Image: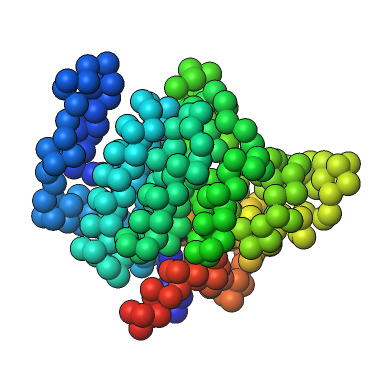
Amino acid sequence: MSLIIDVHGHYTTAPKALEEWRNRQIAAIKDPASKPKVSELKISDDELRETIETNQLAKMKERGSDLTIFSPRASFMAHHIGDFEVSSTWAAICNELCLRVSQLFPENFVPAAMLPQSPGVDPATCIPELVKCVEQYGNVGINLNPDPSGGHWTSPPLSDKSWYPIYEKMVEYDIPAMIHVSTSCNSCFHTTGAHYLNADTTAFMQCLTSDLFKDFPTLKFLIPHGGGAVPYHWGRFRGLAQELKKPLLSEHLLNNIFFDTCVYHQPGIDLLTKVIPVKNIMFASEMIGAVRGIDPETGHYFDDTKRYIESTANLSAEERHQVYEGNARRVFSRLDTKLKSQGR
Ligand SMILES: [Zn+2]
């Protein structure tokens, strides 16, 4: 029996007090006298427990997954709001909540951190929060936003040297980054329908055109939402790599880039598992997230992605085990260490 590890979950169901505190923080950007203190946000363990037990944990039990890598709500990261100080306070609060969830449910949730990114601010400023989250909070990965501007793409590509201090820390700790944008504040791009998928595709192409993984041979990126347009257009990307005189994608990118299974229909998962090598695919659902309804064609939740993994004809039992557990333990090596310490 595989341990079913969902590598992509966010705390989308946090108590209302969190959002209310955030709204006060945002209001105070224009009216500094009204700035809320961190200590004014009070959320009890019972409240945390209830929001998890009635939501994510209930669904995990229903659907048969064991453990979720759990990070702050992606759309709420909203790095474009305020300055570094605003992002820094907000990231610390959100990361602490995910830590507390992981302490209340140590068998079911393992934390991954959001970073206090801010547009135009040197990514190296995120290092102290990253270090705290790994060393003190036991985080097994981070979420890295390639576009802190929220849909205006004002930061340099992920291959730019300004990102390197973060990569150096990731390599030192052997933690992967999920490349994950946040809310779009550009009305051209719907947050979860366009901006997320655009960013997944964009991040992959930034890696393809660069030699980032020559500089960091052990750097690991998880590209979520099934890799955006990447698996569907694999031929285009292979062809572009060839035109650019890059090595085959199998050596140029696939020792470093992984895709999750947050693809919400059977044909999408069939394509993903046909095109992308099994060693590069990790199970994930991102529930309770962008698409919360029931698919009238199947009668099941769109984001119940385990059903599609079970049903696809492309995977053997051994390959399913890789997708559910083996790859996650290899890529998130700190998760593997934690599981072993729990006798799992
Ligand atoms: Zn997400």
Colour pattern: rainbow
- Where is residue 2? Give x, y as percent: 46, 75
Q: Is residue 174 visible?
A: yes
**Residue 86, quarter of picture:** top left
- Quarter of the image for the N terminus: give it: bottom left
- Where is residue 127? Give x, y as percent: 45, 49
Q: Residue at x 57, y 56 (%)?
A: 168
**Residue 27, quarter of picture:** top left
Q: Residue at x 53, y 63 (%)?
A: 172
- Where is residue 91? Give x, y as percent: 33, 42
Total numbered labels: 0
In the displayed structure, would residue 290 be above or below residue 35?
Answer: below
Q: Residue at x 38, y 28 (%)?
A: 83
Q: Is residue 230 visible?
A: no
Q: Nearer the viewer, residue 320 or 96?
A: 96
- Where is residue 153? Give x, y as percent: 57, 27
In the displayed structure, would residue 327 be above or below residue 197?
Answer: below
- Quarter of the image for the C terminus: give it: bottom left
Residue 91 in the figure: left or right of residue 20: right
**Residue 76, quarter of picture:** top left
In the displayed structure, would residue 317 be above or below residue 242?
Answer: below
Residue 177 in the figure: left or right of residue 213: left
